[in-house]
C-alpha cells in the first residue's frame, strides 16, 4: 500500500544509515570530504532505487529510507555495504557505514512525512550498529521470505534499546560467505553479557582457553598478550562466553581500539557496563565506585595503543575488583602488580592436522581441499599461523593456488589485503597490521627491527648485539630493546637450545624487509655474515662447538649466502666461504647426498672465479667421493685447478683440491699415487690442521697398500695434529682409522681402545659412518674370539649404517668386510636371519651397547684415550 506521493504505508520497513567517524573523516580529508559525500550519496541512492526503496529524509551523512517489502530492504542493506566496500574513496579513505532496519505500522501524514514509533525504533537500532554492520530487528527478519542467495540473518541476542518496551531480538545481516563484524554492538544485552557469539567455533586455543578460565576468579587480572592478528579478541570472547553463567552481574566487553586518548577509556568502559555517568561527578571515581560493587567479568580489549597510561586505570579497577575479574587484551603486558600474563602465539602450522591448517580450510569454503597438503602447510607456516592472515589467504586461494600465493607474498606482503568492511581497518592487510604495530614502538625499537630482519632463523643476544649495534644503537641498549620486542609479540623467545634464542615472526620479517632501504639491508646482512663467519667459518676449528653452532645457524648461513650472492665482489667471496661451511657441515653429519645436491646448487649459483671458489669446488668434490661418484668429483677438481692457477687459494686453505685428488687415486685403486701426494703435502704444508688432513690421506694409502704399521704411524700423527689444531671431527676419524690398522696388526686391545676413543668424542662422532665403523671393528674382534654369530650380526649392522649414509668403502675395507662375512658363514650351521631382519628394520641402535661392551672388555677398561 502506498500513499499518494509514493511512500509506502501500512506495514513498512524503515532503513537508517550513517557514516561511523564522519567527523574524523572531515578533519582528515578537508575539502575532499565534500567529494566523498557526493560519492557516498550517489552510491546509496543507486542502491535504494534498484531495490524499490523510497528516500524520505537525510540529515548530514544519514539516509532515511522506507520499503514496502522487508526482503527488498534487507537486500538493499547488504547491497549498500558491498557497494561501499568496493568503492575507491578520496585519499584512500576507509568509509564504514552502519545500517539499522525495523518493521512496523506506519502511515504518511498529510504533510507527506511519517509519524510512527517504528521510525524512531529503526533509528535506535542503527545507532547500536558498528561501522560495516547491518542490524535488523526480529520484526523485520521474521517477516521476510529470506531469499537464499541474497543475505543471511544471524541472531546476536536480546538487547534493551530505548523506545522499545521489551528486549529486542537483533540479527546481523550479511552476504553469505562473508564474515560478521565481531565487535559488540552499542546496546545493553538482556542476556547478562554484550558478547557477540561467533558463527564458527574457535579453532585451536584449547590450552589457552582453559588456562584463562581457571585464572579468572574474583579479584583476578589476566592479560592476553600476542601479536596483532593472532586472535586475542576472539580468544577473550570465547572465554567470556564460557564464563557467562558464573558471574551474577554478567560479562561485559569494552573495545578501546578506536580511542585516541586514555581519558576516553572510562566512558567506553562505562558504556560497556551499562553505567550512566552523572555529569556532576568525576568520571573515573564514579566508575571505580560502581565497579567495586559489581560481581562481573570485564573484558577490556585492545589496550596497546593507550599504554602505559591505561595501566593506571586498569590498576585502579583491579584494586576495586574484589568481587569481579578483569580480562585484558594487549600486544604487550601492562606490567602492573598482580597481573597474570597469558601469551598467545600463532596457531601451530607444522603438519596437515594442526589448527592453522584447519582454520584455513574452514575459511576457504572447501576450496583448500583441492590443493596439495604440503603447499597448504607451507603457506600456513610462512604466515606464522596468524589467524587474520590465514583468513585473508583463505579468500585468496579462491583465485590462486597456495604455492603461487606464497611466492607472491614473499615478493610483496601487500598481496594479502582484504576489502571486507567487517574487519577493523588495521586487520585488512598485513601491511596495515604491522604499520599499526610499528606506530606503537619507540624509534630505537624500530631501528632494532630494521637490523634484525636480515636474520632468517633464530639468534641469541650476543648475535643481536653484534649485528644491530652501530652509530644509531649502543650495544648495551640492544638487550632491553630486544626484550621490548618480545613484550610486543614481534619476536619470540626460544629456550630450547640450552640458552635463550630468539626468532622474529616471519610475517614481520617480510614486512620489514620490504620497507627497509636496500643500502641499510645490505649493511646489516654484511655485519651478520661477518658474525656467522667468526662462529662457523673456516678459521674456526671444526670441533663439537663448531658442529653445535652450525646445527643452530645452518638456515641463517644459507640465507646469508643467497642474500650476498648478487652483491659486490667481496660479498660473493663471503658467500662462497659460508657455502664451504655448509659443505663441511654435510660432511661431518654424513648427509653426503643432501650435501651434493645443496652444495652443487650453490656452486652453480656462485660462479665468480675467486680463491674461495677453488675451496668450494674441492669441498663439493669431497662430497661426491664420499658416495663413490669419482667422475663428477674429477670434473669439480679440474675446474678448481684451472681457477687455482689464475687466482690461488684463500688464506684459510693450504690444500685446495689436493686431498680430493688423493682420494680419487684411492677410489681408482692407485694407493701409491695417494701416498706420494700425501708425502708431498707433508713437506709443503705449515699448519697442524693441514698436516692432519695430509696424514689421513697417507694413512689410508699405506693401509690400502697393506702397510698396516706405516698406516698406524700416519694415523697417530693425524691424531696428534688434530689435537693440536682443535679439529675434533678429524680426531674422531683418526682414532677410527687407527683402530682398523691395529686390527690388521693383531692388536685387538689397542683397536678396541682406539675405537672407544673415537666414539667417546660425542656428540661430534655421533654419525652413521663412525658408528658403522665401530660395529665393524667390534665384528672383527668378535670373529677373533670365534663368536661368529655376534660377528655377522655386528657387521650387518655396520653395513646398514654405512649404506644409509651413502658412504662408499675403499677397496681394502670392502675386502676385509667380505672376508669376515665369508669366514663367518663358513663356520655357522645357519645364518642368523633375525639379526638381518632387525637391522633392516632400523633397530641397529640396540647393537651399539653390545659392541661398546665388547670393546671395553678387550680394552681392559673404559677408554680414556679419547681425551682432548
Image (cartoon, rainbow, N blue to C red):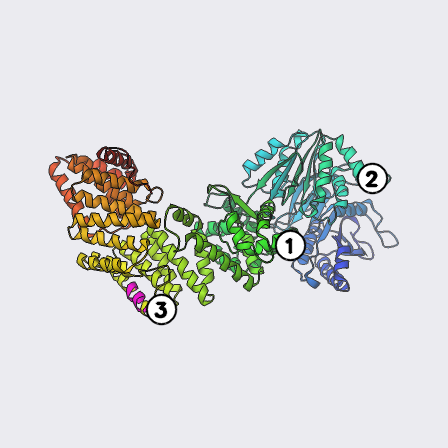
Relative depth, front residue between 798 and 133: 798
Q: Which residue is mark 2?
A: 282
Q: Identify which residue, 784 or 748, lies in the foreground.
A: 748
Q: Quadrant of the C terminus?
A: top left
Could you say which disc has been placed on residue 443 in the image?
A: 1
> Magenta stretch: dominant SS?
helix
Mark 3, other Cα within 10 Å: few <14 / some 14–19 / many ≥20:
some
Which residue is depicted at the point 26% across and 63% down? 634
Q: Classify mark 2: residues with Cα within 10 Å, few (<14), some (14-19) or many (20+).
A: few
For the view shown, which residue lies furthest in the bottom direction? 646
How packed mark 1 is, by other alpha carbons closer than 10 Å (few <14, some 14-19, many 20 or more), is few
Quick one: label 3 or label 1, which is nearer the N terminus?
1
Instruction: Give SS at disc 2.
Output: loop
Q: Earlier in the sequence, mark 1 or mark 2?
A: 2
Report helix, strand or loop for mark 1: helix
Q: Real-space Cα distance between discs 1 and 2?
A: 36 Å
Horizontal side, residue 645 vs residue 341: left or right: left
Nearest to viewer (mark 3 / mark 2):
3
Give the label, 1 or 2, closer to the camera.
1
Residue 43 location in percent, x, y? 71, 61
**Within the image, what quadrant is residue 141 found in?**
top right
- Report the magenta residues as a range: 636-642
Magenta stretch: includes residue 522: no
Residue 616 sits in quarter: bottom left
Nearer the observer, 30 or 109? 30
Q: Label 3, on which residue?
A: 647
Q: Does residue 793 appear left or right of residue 202 in this picture?
A: left
Amino acid at each position: 500500500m502506498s500513499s499518494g506521493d509514493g511512500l509506502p504505508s501500512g506495514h513498512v520497513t524503515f532503513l537508517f544509515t550513517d557514516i561511523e567517524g564522519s567527523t574524523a573523516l572531515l578533519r582528515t580529508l578537508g575539502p575532499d570530504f565534500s567529494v566523498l559525500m557526493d560519492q557516498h550519496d550517489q552510491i546509496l541512492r543507486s542502491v535504494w532505487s534498484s531495490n524499490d526503496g523510497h528516500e524520505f529524509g537525510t540529515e548530514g551523512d544519514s539516509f532515511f529510507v522506507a520499503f514496502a517489502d522487508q526482503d527488498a530492504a534487507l537486500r538493499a542493506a547488504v547491497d549498500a555495504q558491498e557497494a561501499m566496500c568496493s568503492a575507491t574513496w578520496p585519499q584512500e579513505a576507509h568509509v564504514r557505514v552502519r545500517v539499522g532496519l525495523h518493521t512496523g505500522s506506519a502511515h504518511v501524514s498529510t504533510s507527506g512525512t511519517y509519524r510512527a514509533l517504528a521510525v524512531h525504533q529503526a533509528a535506535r537500532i542503527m545507532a547500536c550498529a558498528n561501522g560495516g554492520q547491518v542490524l535488523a530487528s526480529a520484526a523485520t527478519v521474521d517477516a521476510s521470505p529470506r531469499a537464499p542467495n541474497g543475505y543471511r540473518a544471524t541472531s546476536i541476542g536480546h538487547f534493551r534499546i530505548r523506545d522499545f518496551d521489551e528486549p529486542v531480538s537483533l540479527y546481523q545481516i550479511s552476504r553469505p560467505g562473508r564474515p560478521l563484524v565481531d565487535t559488540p554492538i552499542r546496546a545493553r544485552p538482556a542476556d547478562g553479557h554484550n558478547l557477540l557469539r561467533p558463527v564458527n567455533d574457535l579453532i585451536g586455543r584449547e590450552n589457552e582457553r582453559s588456562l584463562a578460565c581457571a585464572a579468572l576468579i574474583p579479584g583476578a587480572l589476566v592479560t592476553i598478550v600476542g601479536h596483532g592478528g593472532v586472535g586475542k579478541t576472539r580468544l577473550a570472547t570465547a572465554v567470556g562466553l564460557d564464563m557467562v553463567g558464573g558471574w551474577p552481574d554478567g560479562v561485559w566487553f569494552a573495545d578501546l581500539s578506536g580511542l585516541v586518548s586514555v581519558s576516553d577509556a572510562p566512558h567506553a568502559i562505562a558504556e560497556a557496563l551499562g553505567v550512566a555517568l552523572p555529569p556532576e561527578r568525576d568520571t573515573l571515581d564514579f566508575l571505580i565506585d560502581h565497579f567495586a560493587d559489581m560481581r562481573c567479568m570485564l573484558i577490556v580489549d585492545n589496550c596497546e595503543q593507550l599504554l602505559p597510561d591505561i595501566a593506571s586505570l586498569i590498576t585502579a579497577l583491579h584494586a576495586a575488583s574484589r568481587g569481579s575479574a578483569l580480562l585484558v587484551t594487549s600486544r604487550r603486558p601492562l606490567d602492573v602488580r598482580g597481573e597474570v600474563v597469558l601469551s598467545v602465539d600463532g596457531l601451530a602450522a607444522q603438519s596437515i592436522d594442526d589448527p592453522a591448517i584447519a582454520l584455513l580450510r574452514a575459511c576457504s569454503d572447501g576450496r583448500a581441499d583441492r590443493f596439495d597438503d604440503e603447499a597448504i602447510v607451507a603457506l600456513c607456516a610462512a604466515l606464522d599461523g596468524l589467524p587474520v592472515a590465514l583468513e585473508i589467504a583463505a579468500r585468496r586461494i579462491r583465485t590462486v593456488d597456495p604455492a603461487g600465493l606464497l611466492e607472491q607474498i614473499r615478493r610483496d606482503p601487500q598481496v594479502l589485503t582484504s576489502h571486507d568492511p567487517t574487519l577493523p581497518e588495521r586487520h585488512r592487510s598485513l601491511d596495515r597490521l604491522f604499520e599499526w604495530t610499528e606506530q606503537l614502538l619507540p624509534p630505537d625499537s624500530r631501528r632494532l627491527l630494521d637490523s634484525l630482519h636480515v636474520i632468517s632463523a633464530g639468534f641469541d643476544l650476543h648475535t643481536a648485539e653484534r649485528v644491530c649495534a652501530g652509530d644509531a644503537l649502543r650495544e648495551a641498549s640492544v638487550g632491553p630493546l630486544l626484550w621490548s620486542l618480545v613484550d610486543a609479540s614481534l619476536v619470540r623467545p626460544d629456550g630450547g637450545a640450552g640458552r635463550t634464542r630468539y626468532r622474529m615472526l616471519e610475517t614481520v620479517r617480510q614486512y620489514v624487509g620490504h620497507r627497509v632501504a636496500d643500502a641499510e639491508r645490505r649493511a646489516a646482512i654484511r655485519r651478520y655474515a661477518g658474525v656467522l663467519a667468526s662462529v662457523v667459518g673456516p678459521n674456526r676449528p671444526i670441533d663439537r662447538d663448531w658442529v653445535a653452532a652450525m646445527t643452530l645457524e645452518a638456515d641463517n648461513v644459507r640465507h646469508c649466502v643467497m642474500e650476498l650472492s648478487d652483491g659486490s665482489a667481496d660479498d660473493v667471496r663471503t658467500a662462497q666461504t659460508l657455502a664451504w661451511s655448509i659443505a663441511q657441515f654435510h660432511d661431518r653429519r654424513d648427509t653426503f647426498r643432501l650435501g651434493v645436491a645443496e652444495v652443487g646448487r650453490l656452486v652453480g649459483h656462485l660462479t665468480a672465479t675467486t680463491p674461495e671458489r677453488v675451496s668450494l669446488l674441492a669441498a663439493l668434490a669431497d662430497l661426491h667421493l664420499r658416495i663413490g661418484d669419482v667422475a663428477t668429483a674429477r670434473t669439480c677438481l679440474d675446474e678448481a685447478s684451472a681457477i687455482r692457477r689464475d687466482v690461488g687459494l684463500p688464506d684459510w686453505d693450504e690444500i685446495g683440491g689436493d686431498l680430493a685428488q688423493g682420494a680419487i687415486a684411492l677410489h681408482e685403486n692407485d694407493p701409491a699415487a695417494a701416498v706420494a701426494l700425501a708425502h708431498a703435502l707433508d713437506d709443503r704444508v705449515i699448519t697442524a690442521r693441514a698436516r692432519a688432513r695430509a696424514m689421513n690421506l697417507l694413512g689410508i694409502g699405506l693401509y690400502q697398500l697393506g702397510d698396516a704399521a706405516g698406516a698406524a704411524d700416519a694415523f697417530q700423527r693425524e691424531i696428534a695434529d688434530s689435537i693440536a689444531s682443535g679439529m675434533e671431527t678429524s680426531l674422531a676419524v683418526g682414532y677410527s682409522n687407527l683402530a682398523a690398522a691395529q686390527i690388521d696388526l693383531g692388536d685387538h686391545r689397542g683397536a678396541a681402545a682406539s675405537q672407544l676413543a673415537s666414539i667417546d668424542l660425542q656428540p661430534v662422532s655421533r654419525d652413521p659412518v663412525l658408528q658403522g665403523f665401530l660395529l665393524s671393528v667390534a665384528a672383527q674382534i668378535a670373529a677373533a674370539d670365534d663368536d661368529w654369530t655376534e660377528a655377522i650380526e655386528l657387521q650387518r649392522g655396520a653395513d646398514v649404517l654405512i649404506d644409509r649414509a651413502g658412504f662408499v668403502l675403499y677397496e681394502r675395507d670392502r675386502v676385509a668386510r667380505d672376508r669376515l662375512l665369508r669366514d663367518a658363514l663358513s663356520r655357522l650351521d645357519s645364518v642368523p636371519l633375525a639379526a638381518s631382519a632387525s637391522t633392516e628394520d632400523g633397530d641397529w641402535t640396540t647393537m651399539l651397547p653390545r659392541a661398546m661392551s665388547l670393546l671395553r672388555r678387550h680394552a681392559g677398561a673404559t677408554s680414556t684415550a679419547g681425551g682432548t
